[in-house]
Amino acid sequence: MSLGQSQPEQVSAPSIKGCLTGAPLTEATGSDEARHECFLQAEADFGETSPYKPVREFGLQRHQFFLLSAGCLMLGLLMYIFKSHSADPANYIYRHVPDGLWAASFMAAITFIWFDQAKPRYLWSVASIALMILFEFFQYNGLISGTGEPVDVLYYLFFSLPVMVLKKTTNNQ
């Protein structure tokens, strides 16, 4: 660099790029407060409809829970329709995964319906998991017809609990 040229000014404020990409907090992106200010400025600059609108936190949007519910339901239905009835251990998955997909579909539907209301969403989610477990318990003890299998309860929990955490709570919701 020649003597007549000046060096670019060092900027200590967080970069807008760090806010948009969700980069981890470093010296380049600044403190939580500076990052939040950067986010608010980017939101104001880009507006609500911009594809470059910054993302606050991880989580699915409401319409994505509808798609997840429909997709899980359809996949479970297809697996149930085309399942094999042999005793082959490989078919073990086809006996239990449709139940888990049904549970995931139900959780996604509950989240879709009660998306902006945390208390009803968690109440219905917990109640539905309890009913799924009771249903298997009643089948296992012969109180209702069907084959109650403890493995089904594990599949219900394994598939439904992750769907519950896909809705990231913000603003005490």
Image: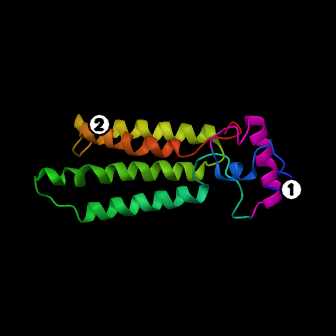
Which residue of the protein is positioned furthest toward the right in this rendering? 4
The residue at 23%/34% (across/down) is 141
Q: Residues within 10 Å of mark 1 (few under 14, many from 20)?
A: few
- Magenta stretch, residue numbers: 24-49
Label number found at residue 138: 2
x, y percentage for residue 46?
79, 60
Q: Is residue 102 left or right of residue 139?
A: right
Q: Residues within 10 Å of mark 2 (few under 14, many from 20)?
A: some
| Nearest the eye: 98 or 1 | 1
Quadrant where the N terminus is found in the figure: bottom right
Res. 4 visible in picture: yes
* Whether residue 21 is situated above or below residue 32 in the rendered picture: below
x, y percentage for residue 117?
65, 43
The residue at 75%/52% (across/down) is 16
Res. 143 visible in picture: no
From the image, state whether disc 1 or disc 2 is nearer to you: 1
Check residue 68 for magenta coloring: no
The local secondary structure at tag 1 comes to loop
The residue at 29%/36% (across/down) is 138
Quadrant where the C terminus is found in the figure: top right
x, y percentage for residue 159?
39, 46
Identify which amino acid the numbered label 1 is placed on: Gln
Residue that carries the numbered disc 1 in the rendered image = 5
The local secondary structure at tag 2 comes to helix
